[in-house]
Amino acid sequence: MHKLSTIKAAILTFLSFSYLVNGFAQKIPVNYDESQMPAYILPDPLVLPNGKLIKTKEVWEKTGRPAVLKLFAENVYGVNPFPGSIKIEVKVKAVNENALGGKAVSKQITLRFPEISPTLAVNILLYLPKNAQKAPVFVSLNFMGNHTATQEKDVFVTENWVNSNFDKTFVNNKATDASRGIAERRWPMEAIVSRGYAVATAYYGDLEADHAEGWKTGLRSVLTPEQREKWSAIGVWAWSMSRMVDYLLKNELQIDKQKIIAVGHSRIGKATLWAAAEDPRFAIVISNDSGEGGAALARRWIGETVEHLNTQFPHWFCANYKKYNNAVAKLPVDQHELLGLMAPRPLYVASATKDVWADPKGEFMSAIEAEKVYQLYKQTGLGTTTMPPPNTPVGQIIGYHIREGVHDILLYDWQQYMNFADKHFEIK
Ligand code: GCU
């Protein structure tokens, strides 16, 4: 009895703490109690705007998919003002034939977009496993600069704005040499290249700093106010991932161009899902703890809500998304339909047990619902509707695990992603 009440008190303290962090500060209530959640009806990805049911993959591809994609662009992630091919200037700034203790070759490449801006650039750090001829490659943005993903001294320190709240080594929103390797736990590069995978990463803030005024020095600064409002920071980050793919496809590299994997954590997980929805060149898609505005169902009133997102991060989504702050039932899509846009590509959704703000159950349920679209391709999605225990991956064309622990991306997660990619790419 005594023990139970202690546990209860601990839970209540934790909940009120998250309420303080995420709730009172914004005066938006936070709910973690399933019994308090109002009932909701999810939109059906297989029902066309005219009410007709989609029964074949042909109709889905011709009519259903473009309609859902458009709804997401217009209401959530924004309309990309630069569709089509983009002129890219490539500059290889450094090559290290003996990176990661001799296990890899590293390349640092700058991409510029002369027709859009003379100064904006995406700076890629690419690790290629030393002896692989055709390595599958993970494309993933990082939160704090390439130099934070590794201790390697030759990796350039980002000169772009960084969030000083993210780390004490950041001074006045500038990264310093002292921040080398601070995010290493999220980037187990040696373990990845040892399994024959390449990694291409870039700082997510290269084309738009992550704050409300970030657009002023970023890619959206070249747009008209109307275009800018219609797009979003997440749209820009997703766009940068597609430019990384342009580079990987157009250059002579020891990678397998059919095996490009999009992976991202949290807000970058949201951008990753959107990147892969827009860009079919990503062959596998992985969402790590992407939560609200990512894999989690928006209509579930658990943890973060659309209103929290738009209040704390007004620049992340397009202006229209704010219309749904207090009217999520009117949102013409929900996030399972975003997952459905990945079909028939293998998709992996991951959660963490302590990441209640991201609503792990909502992420899992979204993955279940996405199966409807995969069934048009005669594919089994998760193959289960029971949430697995921690650290127990499940699924077929859609994979899922809930890692024990906090909101993060760790070696355990990467190992599951490589196992999943090995299986679907038939790598022995
Ligand atoms: C905040 C935000 C989440 C986001 C996370 C992150 O917690 O509310 O939506 O996923 O930051 O990017 O780490």
Image (spheres, grey):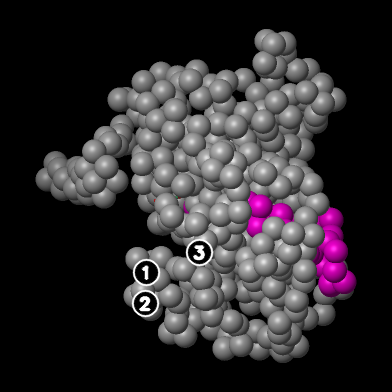
- The reply to whether callout 1 and callout 3 are in contact (CB within 8 Å) is no
Q: Secondary structure at mark 1?
A: helix
Q: Residue at x 69, y 78 (%)?
A: 108
Q: Alpha-carbon distance for marks 1 and 3? A: 12 Å
Taking the magenta stretch, the answer to whether it contains residue 240 is: yes
Label 2 sits on a secondary structure element that is: loop
| Residue nearer the viewer, 117 or 406 | 117
Q: Is residue 405 left or right of residue 265?
A: left
Residue position marked by numbered label 3 in the rendering: 143
Residue drawn at (63%, 69%) of the image? 119
Q: Label 2, on which residue? A: 171
11 falls in the magenta region: no
Q: Could you tell me the amino acid type at mark 3?
A: Phe
Number of the front mark, 3 or 2? 2
Looking at the rendered image, the quarter that the N terminus falls into is top left
Percent of width and height locating residue 114? 73, 64
Q: Which residues are magenta?
A: 237-266
Q: Which residue is at the far front?
A: 224
Q: Amino acid at mark 2?
A: Val
Q: Earlier in the sequence, mark 1 or mark 3?
A: 3
Q: How many numbered discs, if any?
A: 3
Tell me which label, 3 or 2, sits earlier in the chain.
Answer: 3
Q: Are marks 3 and 2 in contact (CB under 8 Å)?
A: no
Instruction: Judge: label 3 CB < 8 Å from ligand 1.
Output: yes
Tag 1 residue: 164
Distance of mark 1 from mark 2, alpha carbons? Answer: 6 Å
Residue 350 in the image, given as x and y percentages of width and height:
55, 49
Disc 1 and disc 2 in contact, CB within 8 angstroms: yes
Judge the density around disc 1: few (<14), some (14-19), many (≥20) Cα neighbours within 10 Å: some
Is residue 48 visible in the rendered image? The answer is: yes
